[in-house]
């Protein structure tokens, strides 16, 4: 099968031009940094390619045209990477002329930051402290996994001390050494160490570059279902925060607002309402038992 990306086409089985205008406000470039719109666009195109070309190579169409707008090299690199998962021949048609095969290999190098194509550059972010994030999704295709390389400057951390409810997370130390906070313990980690953080035990972790050198890690997340449909609860004990993310979710709430399962079972039928700090106040709603007495003090 071959895919033809036709610039300026007035029609085509897949109207990437219209979708690009919708996701990126008619700009010809990819938004700087790791924008959620890049992932959303990739998911849309992935689904469209599946519907139009078929998910089995044996039954795929011989040729499919994508109508595209005029794009920057970075944006075109992203589009070529996504299309290359679906076909071993990908061409750009511009002014009636067909390019050579522009197929892109499904490969990123986790060590070499000096040789990046346009799509890789557009998904590389550097913060004020000098720490660098290289986001690899959707360069490796949309799916249930998420990968990025993080270069953590001295005395900086990769993330807050946190746990996930719906994500298995793993860290591979590529270069340097640092401290791993894992639940109530701290251990030194270095080059070649692969750190496991599966969901289930509610494991909380943080990596800190506190040993006099930069720390370079590969951060890998595996979602239990596609991230587009998942809901994840993230606990940040240091800050007493709970973050909820996923379709229809997007909030930070105080950790104290959680109640224990015993509290829930014992007092569910009583007439009270919960307050933001995890406490409660009497409620006169009909059909509920009288609320328990408050503890003295």
Image: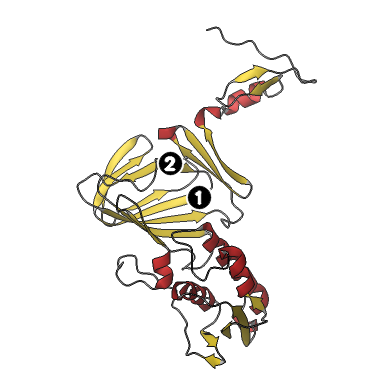
Residue 51, image x, y percentages: 67, 73
View extreme (top): residue: 296
Label whose residue precedes the other's in the sequence (1 or 2): 2
Q: Residues within 10 Å of mark 1 (few under 14, many from 20)?
A: many
Residue at the bottom extreme of this rendering: 97
Residue at horizontal 67%, vertical 77%? 52
Q: Which residue is mark 1?
A: 167
Q: Which residue is mark 2?
A: 162
> How does the figure colour the protein chain or chains?
secondary structure
Q: Going by the image, does 123 lie left or right of 260? A: left
Is residue 2 among what the camera can see? yes
Q: Nearer the viewer, residue 258 or 8?
A: 8
Q: Vertical placement of 265 versus 72: above or below?
A: above
Which residue shows up at 51% across the image and 31% down it?
Answer: 254
Work out whether residue 286 or residue 78 is closer to the camera in this orientation and state it.
78
Query: For residue 220, which quarter of the picture?
Result: bottom left
Which sits in the foreground, 203 or 101? 101
Where's residue 81, x and y in %? 48, 74
Q: Secondary structure at mark 2?
A: loop
Q: Is residue 54 visible?
A: no
Residue 182 rendering spot, x and y as whole percentages: 36, 40
Alpha carbons under labels 1 and 2: distance apart:
12 Å
């Amino acid at each position: 099968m071959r895919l033809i990306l036709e610039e300026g086409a007035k029609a085509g089985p897949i109207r990437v031009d219209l979708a690009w205008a919708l996701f990126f406000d008619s700009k010809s470039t990819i938004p700087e940094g790791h924008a959620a719109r890049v992932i959303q666009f990739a998911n849309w195109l992935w689904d469209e390619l599946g519907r139009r070309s078929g998910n089995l190579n044996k039954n795929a169409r011989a040729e499919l045209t994508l109508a595209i707008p005029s794009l920057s090299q970075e944006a075109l690199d992203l589009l070529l990477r996504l299309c290359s998962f679906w076909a071993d021949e990908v061409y750009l048609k511009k002014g009636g002329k067909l390019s050579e095969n522009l197929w892109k290999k499904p490969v990123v190098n986790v060590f070499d930051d000096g040789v990046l194509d346009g799509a890789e550059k557009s998904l590389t972010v550097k913060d004020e402290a000098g720490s660098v994030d290289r986001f690899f999704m959707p360069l490796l295709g949309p799916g249930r996994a998420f990968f990025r390389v993080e270069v953590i400057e001295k005395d900086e951390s990769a993330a807050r001390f946190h746990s996930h409810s719906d994500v298995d997370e793993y860290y591979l130390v590529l270069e340097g050494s640092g401290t791993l906070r894992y639940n109530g313990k701290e251990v030194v980690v270095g080059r070649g160490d692969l750190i496991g953080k599966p969901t289930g035990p509610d494991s909380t972790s943080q990596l800190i570059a506190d040993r006099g050198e930069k720390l370079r890690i590969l951060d890998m997340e595996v979602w239990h279902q596609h991230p587009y449909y998942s809901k994840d609860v993230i606990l940040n004990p240091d800050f007493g925060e709970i973050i909820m993310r996923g379709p229809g979710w997007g909030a930070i709430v105080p950790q104290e607002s959680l109640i224990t399962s015993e509290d829930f079972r014992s007092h569910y039928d009583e007439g009270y309402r919960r307050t933001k700090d995890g406490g409660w106040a009497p409620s006169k709603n009909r059909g509920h038992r009288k609320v328990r007495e408050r503890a003295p003090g």
